[in-house]
Amino acid sequence: MKVLLTGATGFLGEYMIQELLENNYEVVAFGRNEKKGKYLSENYKNVKFVKGNLENREDLEKITDQIDFVIHAGGLSTVWGRWEDFYNANVLGTQNILDFCEKQNVKRLVFVSSPSVYAKKGDSLQVKEEEAPTENNLNFYIKSKLMAEKSIKESSYKLWVIIRPRGLFGVGDTSIVPRLLKLNGKIGIPLFAGGNQMIDVTCVENVALSLRLAMENENALGKIYNITNDEPMKFKEILDLFFAEMGIKGKYVNFNYPFTKGIVTILEKVYSFFKIRKEPPLTLYTLYLLRYSQTLSVEKAKKELGYKPKMTVREGVKKYVEHNRKSWLFFMWLL
């Protein structure tokens, strides 16, 4: 059986390839990074790389293999940017994938969405899939993900499953953990409410597992699933796990939330007015993540998909630190 994996050259991609190969699938890896794509096809048996952009239907037409399943993990994932870029990558790209699935008679499409669609001011605990709003304009990324989900739900292609994985981390992560480590080495990590807000994270290995389960389970068709490590923790508690494993002390700075929110609101308006592409130092979305509790219920995935995390948060932290301890970049983060 052959699986088309979009976003194959991104953070999740190689983990997904490993999960599929271990379960006897062949993979067509679709992505933009030719260097990483070449690495994947040369270092893994039964992996074929196709360079392309999801926005261009012609690039998808380069795929000549008979595809049985599609795992759509490609797109633009950042908290700041132009609406046109998010729309093209996340909405138009998804619509092109839907057309591909219908034309190729693909047996199942698994779409990697985001639990950022739940983001809002205030605490939200054990959020269930059906609690997602139909609209959320907190940022363009969230808006584009909801529009992509809507495109899937309203499509004439009905063989789909949507997965919303929270806070991926692991070896190869270039976003969440590196940013926090850099902050710790400079001004310190900002805390609101003492860092006691409850959050979820997910080992990237567990996300790859959940996507395969969603692809294989007949009962999953037409459904949406949250995915986390099912280990809600305080924000500061997770950071302390990293620092303890690294053998360094965490540097924390307590911020005043009302004052910070006022500054962030002004910054976003200024950046938007002057069409500044660079991400502001802090956005409202990130501020809400740092201030409010948000945990997700994964009971539906556990019950219907048979999802059971194969790596704990502590195991994931240990693996991440052990890997990066060997890298010069790891030490640069501590400066």
Image (spheres, rainbow, N blue to C red):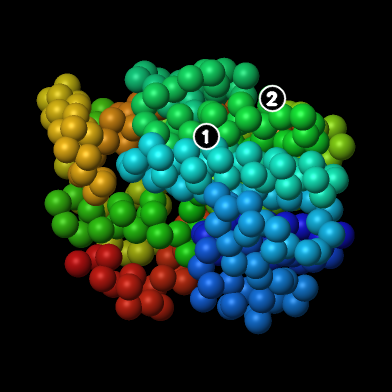
- The residue lying at 69 percent from left, 63 percent from top is 62
Q: Which mark is residue 154?
A: 2
Q: Quadrant of residue 193?
A: top left
Asked whether residue 327 appears in the rendered view, the answer is yes
**Amino acid, disc 2:** Glu
In this view, 46 is above or below 313: below
Q: Name the quarter where the C terminus is drawn.
A: bottom left
Between disc 1 and disc 2, the foreground one is 2
Which residue shows up at 81% across the image and 64% down it? Answer: 65
Residue at the (73%, 47%) spot, across then down: 100
Q: Are marks 1 and 2 in contact (CB under 8 Å)?
A: no
Secondary structure category for the residue under label 1: helix
Image coordinates for residue 309, horizontal then vertical, percent: 66, 47
Left or right of 36, for residue 263: left
Q: Which mark is residue 145?
A: 1
Identify the image quadrant of residue 261: top left
Name the disc covering residue 52, or none.
Answer: none
